[in-house]
Image (cartoon, rainbow, N blue to C red):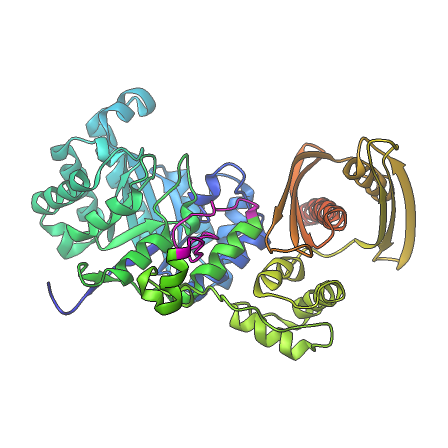
């Protein structure tokens, strides 16, 4: 093994393939926040979205290209002119743009999905790469379902697209069918069959996790010539997900004795990035998830605890600090000032601006009045309420709920109209305290919402634990997610619902503004 390790390019597709997971959609502000955190993690490429898919995806790719300048930004496009044109329209603002175009190459996809011949697909692939190349130097081409593509035809497509100008060739295991030895051999054969692949382009792999082998297959690919791995935070993605970024990166770092490649990832940013994603989407990782799960560095068995007390190496192959997990509690209370709070947030990976810190501080002081000691997990929970970019039309001042199996549930709510600084009060009965709270808020704000999903997660321990509430609410056939954290579940529920209300009102206001802008532009 060479003493000099190859650097593997980390291509993060959390905002594209990952966002296609059910329940993982994000709005523009949330995508921007995630992209900035991915830049702090120092991924090499951010696949920001699929610009042709929707106006929202287009705007997100454009905004990330404009605002996240220290990382390569990619946009996905099918091998058709309209997709590639639209991708470049969004990516043209990037400091380092990449157009990523793809077409299926397996016979099963050609026959049933595309209804095209091999020659027609080859011609489309070459034309797509040539068009993309006319826009920017950095062009990636993917052979969708390469895992089930016949070897000679795969080599023919790869060779032709390299000649057309592709600088990265991606070989996806689109359906997650491969096993590591098979996938490694496929990479080795491809490199042998197309010698110019490693001279003129970067060989990439994109593995899905249907058999739980995505990370193993990615490692096998790198052992056999791949120089780029496509992956996502927490392994989110279509069906069973993609290769998990944190697992691949920490495997490279922990088993450096066997693997002759490394990455440029700042591993201490892994856990803050994972937490930001779960708090944004409301989709949590299982407790025993490798690297970032709640139990990844927890020890309950007595013999394990004894070993850990003597030397952590007995049962830990990496330190929690190496991935950004802070085990110790922070001693913060109601007398702590903004400076101390800002410093602790910075240590946890969140550099807050003044307005963000002010919001976070209000939540912190409210929680500090109810708890003697504030832990790092408490701070990670409440920061999500402190960094929201959605302006508050309505602010929660007061709630009171009555519930039980012998009384009619009801709620009293007092909201502040932030435009006029006036207080508005209402009360309503309901099938339960949650129903009553939502009805009271609806009557005040003039909307009628339908809660389609309601989740409560306890993220700290003890009788004064902090609970996170995630709601999915539909207003006018459009779904919004609200989230809030508190030691009181009804308080968190009301503020989570109000968070969704403010998002709906903000979206409605933006929609009206765009209509006015379009009308004015046509005059």
Quadrant for the N terminus, please: bottom left
Magenta residue span: 281-302
Q: Is residue 172 above or below residue 394?
A: above
Residue at image point 92% right, 48% down: 425
Residue 331 versus residue 146: which sits nearer the camera?
A: 331
Q: Position of residue 431 (x, y in %)?
A: 81, 30
Q: Could you say where residue 461 lies in the image, as x and y percent from the top left? A: 60, 55
Q: Per the image, is 188 magenta? A: no
Give residue 272's position: percent from left, percent from top: 49, 61
Predominant secondary structure in magenta? loop
Q: Residue at x 20, y 31 (%)?
A: 149
Residue 267 figure quarter:
bottom left
Identify whether 310 is placed above or below 461.
below
Residue 473 appears left or right of 49: right
Q: Is residue 115 above or below residue 470?
A: above
Q: Image point 54% across, 58% down: which residue?
A: 33
Quick check: 133 left or right of 91? left
Is residue 137 at least partly visible in the picture?
Answer: no
Query: So how many labels did they put on this image?
Result: 0
Image position of 425 (left or right of 220): right
Q: Position of residue 215 (x, y in %)?
A: 29, 47
Q: In terms of image quadrants, where is residue 337?
A: bottom right
Please name whichever residue, 28 or 362, is drawn nearer the observer in this view of the structure: 362
Can the viewer see residue 141 in this picture? yes
């Amino acid at each position: 093994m060479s003493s000099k390790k190859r650097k593997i390019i980390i291509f993060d597709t959390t905002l594209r393939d990952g966002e296609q997971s059910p329940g993982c959609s994000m709005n523009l502000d949330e995508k921007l926040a995630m992209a900035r955190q991915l830049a702090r993690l120092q991924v090499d490429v951010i696949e920001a979205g699929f610009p042709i898919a929707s106006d929202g995806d287009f705007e997100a790719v454009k905004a990330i290209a404009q605002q996240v300048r220290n990382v390569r930004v990619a946009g996905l496009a099918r091998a058709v002119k309209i997709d590639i044109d639209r991708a470049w329209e969004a990516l043209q603002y990037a400091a380092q743009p990449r157009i990523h175009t793809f077409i299926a190459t397996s016979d099963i996809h050609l026959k049933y999905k595309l209804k095209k011949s091999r020659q027609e697909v080859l011609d489309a692939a070459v034309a797509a790469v040539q068009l993309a190349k006319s826009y920017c130097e950095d062009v990636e081409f993917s052979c969708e379902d390469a895992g089930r593509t016949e070897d000679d035809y795969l080599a023919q497509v790869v060779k032709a697209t390299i000649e057309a100008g592709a600088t990265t060739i991606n070989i996806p295991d689109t359906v997650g069918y491969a096993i590591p030895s098979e996938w490694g051999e496929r990479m080795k054969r491809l490199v042998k069959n197309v010698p110019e692949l490693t001279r003129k382009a970067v060989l990439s792999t994109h593995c899905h996790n249907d058999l739980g082998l995505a990370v193993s297959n990615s490692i096998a690919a790198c052992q056999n010539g791949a120089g780029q791995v496509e992956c996502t935070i927490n392994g989110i993605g279509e069906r069973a997900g993609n290769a998990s970024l944190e697992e691949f990166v920490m495997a490279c770092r922990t088993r450096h004795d066997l693997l002759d490649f490394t990455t440029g990832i700042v591993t201490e940013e892994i856990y803050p990035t994972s937490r930001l994603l779960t708090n944004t989407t409301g989709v949590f990782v299982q407790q025993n998830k490798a690297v970032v799960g709640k139990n990844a560095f927890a020890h309950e068995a007595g013999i394990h605890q004894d070993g850990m007390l003597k030397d952590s190496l007995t049962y830990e192959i990496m330190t929690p600090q190496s991935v950004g997990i802070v085990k110790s509690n922070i001693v913060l209370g109601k007398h702590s000032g903004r400076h101390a709070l800002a410093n602790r947030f910075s240590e946890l990976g969140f550099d807050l601006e003044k307005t963000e810190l002010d919001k976070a501080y209000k939540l912190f002081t409210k929680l500090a009045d109810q708890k003697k000691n504030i832990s790092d997990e408490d701070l990670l929970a409440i920061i999500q309420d402190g960094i929201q970019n959605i302006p508050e039309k309505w602010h929660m001042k007061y709630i009171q709920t009555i519930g039980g199996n012998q009384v009619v549930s009801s709620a009293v709510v007092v909201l502040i109209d932030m435009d006029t600084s006036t207080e508005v009060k209402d009360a309503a009965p309901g099938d339960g305290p949650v129903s009553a709270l939502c009805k009271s808020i609806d009557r005040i704000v003039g909307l009628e919402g339908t809660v389609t999903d309601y989740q409560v997660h306890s993220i700290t321990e003890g009788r004064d634990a902090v609970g996170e509430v995630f709601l999915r609410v539909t207003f006018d056939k459009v779904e919004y997610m609200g989230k809030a954290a508190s030691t009181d579940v009804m308080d968190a529920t009301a503020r989570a619902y109000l968070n969704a209300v403010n998002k709906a009102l903000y979206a409605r206001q933006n929609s009206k503004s765009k209509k006015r802008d379009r009308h004015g532009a046509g005059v």
